[in-house]
Image (spheres, grey):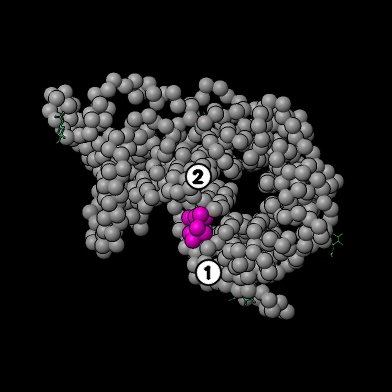
Amino acid sequence: MPWVPSLSLAAVLWVTAFAGEGSCPAGAGSKCDAATGSTAATSGEDRPAAKVKVLPTADILTQEIDELKGVMQICKERIELLEELDRTVKSGVNLSLPESHMRMLKEQLPLMSEVTTVDEDKAPTSSAADFLIAKAVIPQETPASLVQFLSLRSRGSPSAPTQTNMPTALLVAVEANSNVRLYAPTGEEVLAFSAGHEQPVTYLAVSPSHEDGLITTADAGGTIRIHTVNVRQHRLAKEKKKGSPSDEKRSQFLGTQVNVTSQFTTEMQLPAGSAKLTALAMATQQGAKFVAAGDDEGKVSIFSHNGSFVAKVDAGQGSRVEAFSSHLSSFMFHAGSEWGFINFERLLVQHVSCPEFEGRVTSVVIDSQQASRVVVSDEEGTIWVFNLKEKKKCKLEHRFPKGATRGQVDLASIRGFTIALERAGQGVDAAAVLAINMSHVGKSHQPSSVVWRAGRSAVRDWAVHKRHQQGDLLAFLSEDGRAVEVFELLMQVYTPPPATDAFGDFKMPVIAVAIVLVLGYQYMKQKGNFGGGGKGGHGGGGKGFDTGELAALKRKLEMSKKLGGGAGKPRPGAGGL
Ligand SMILES: *[C@@H]1O[C@H](CO)[C@@H](O)[C@H](O)[C@H]1NC(C)=O
Ligand SMILES: *[C@@H]1O[C@H](CO)[C@@H](O)[C@H](O)[C@H]1NC(C)=O
Ligand SMILES: *[C@@H]1O[C@H](CO)[C@@H](O)[C@H](O)[C@H]1NC(C)=O
Ligand SMILES: *[C@@H]1O[C@H](CO)[C@@H](O)[C@H](O)[C@H]1NC(C)=O
């Protein structure tokens, strides 16, 4: 069983991480952060060595109990320390602490438990570490400026239609100098080619449908170029193929199983006299494919995907087109105070106006489960949900609490959740990623809709890829363009496998391993970028035990309980069909 070593390794690391964190007294601040950081660093150095050693093993229940006992021990020591401090402070002995600190220790404060409940509707209910798994950090030799996920069609042969080796998406990273690099979600580079622009590349769009494999790039001079990416099983590629175009680039990855190629398809140019290009997207409506390019004056130039110019429509009425969002046949834009839909066939712009909406739209996304539902963020970062029947009648379905999300917010929709990227400022804690629970739409008196929140360093670009029956993918390009981090997001509701599934009894251990891994290895490794439970506002809880960690702990225990029930049983359904 290959997961056993990684499980115990993760558990060992997790204990280290937790111990390091737990030994910080509440409110010790940056001094304690530094200490924790060094703990993490040391363990990180130990890792390669630990792989070589034969690691002790224990069943998961024993490990859970040991871990919890460890936590109890830490709590006991902490209580003793705090009691001692309390006695000392009250005895009036000169602690050689600055006067302000002494005053702080003696001051009567409102109860912290009361303070935190004020924010209950905004604080995350879980820890990001429960859902996000790091898949790869892809270094970029020369800084990239844009990232996207390109959906792939699976081209398995008819005799073996479910080819498991085929990735369902490739990560596309584009540099200003036209270099395009494609990566498997695991981080393996599968193809690099030049998009052939003469000016710096400023925008990137991919075809919405997994049938096409089109990558569209636009440069500062208003030139737009389309490349087609093909991914084939080698078995098919072996068949004799005549007249392969000479400008086709090749690569192989995943051993020798898959063959990725790219081919220049067409080029188009913004009409003369157009303002600077500010937004780019591809769309499919009524089976026809389009490229839409928004500009600084609110105009949208529409091209047929074969490169021929169709028309220019006025969407922004003078305001810069900021972004597009499309889902199925719905295509939306927002520009200044204007937002709405574009119908490419009838060359029609349908403006949306919602009487209850105050402020200006800063991001729009169409709900991936319900095409008439639109999620919008305003200038304060507050998230609104509207129902747009026939794309006109606007009904406010929900407004998430003010302050649950803040600042410049970018939105993406996955099944059941909206992923929001807050871009507050600069530096290490410059951004945050959140998951908003869309099951709360239309319901009042719900606990916080923020499922998790993860602080992270500034992001130049990001991408979300929704997957069917698999974890969704997230990618973040660092502010300096030097690294792309890829995460898998496991937010699907867990449904037990049918009894006839021969692999059913494997799923619980696999999930348990994933969670232990996430809690341990992940927790430490990502500590630099993802600040644990985040800044959701749990008053003075201190760094050691925030609600996120406790929730994670509870979850672990529940998981191990479930596992304990099934672990000893023989494989169910192994005999049945
Ligand atoms: C406490 O000790 C420090 C030096 O250790 C001294 O500067 C300070 O004045 C003392 N405070 C009191 C209240 O005695
Ligand atoms: C990859 O595909 C291209 C185009 O179909 C083909 O010419 C090439 O031989 C393939 N490479 C391999 C190693 O099969
Ligand atoms: C491009 O496609 C449009 C229809 O989508 C067609 O009318 C036009 O003739 C095509 N242009 C070229 C150059 O193929
Ligand atoms: C989302 O909200 C629903 C309804 O309140 C709840 O049952 C569900 O557990 C929530 N999901 C997560 C991941 O928190």
Q: Judge whether 201 appears above or below 114 on screen.
A: below
- Give the image location of residue 457, x and y in percent: 46, 49
Mark drawn on residue 94: none
Query: Viewer-proximal residue, 152 or 264?
Result: 264
- Give the image location of residue 135, x and y in percent: 46, 55
The residue wearing badge 1 is 253
Query: Viewer-proximal residue, 260 or 30?
Result: 30
Q: Determine the residue positioned at 52% across, 72% down.
A: 256
Q: Determine the residue positioned at 49% across, 67% down.
A: 141
Task: Mark 1: give few (<14), some (14-19) or many (20+) Cα within 10 Å.
Answer: some
Task: Mark 2: give few (<14), some (14-19) or many (20+) Cα within 10 Å.
Answer: some
Q: Quadrant of ligand 3?
A: bottom right
The residue wearing badge 2 is 425
Q: Which residues are magenta?
A: 477-485
In whole angstroms, how far apart are the C-alphas of marks 2 and 1?
38 Å
* Total marks placed: 2
Corner quadrant of residue 399: top right
- Any part of residue 375 in sight: no
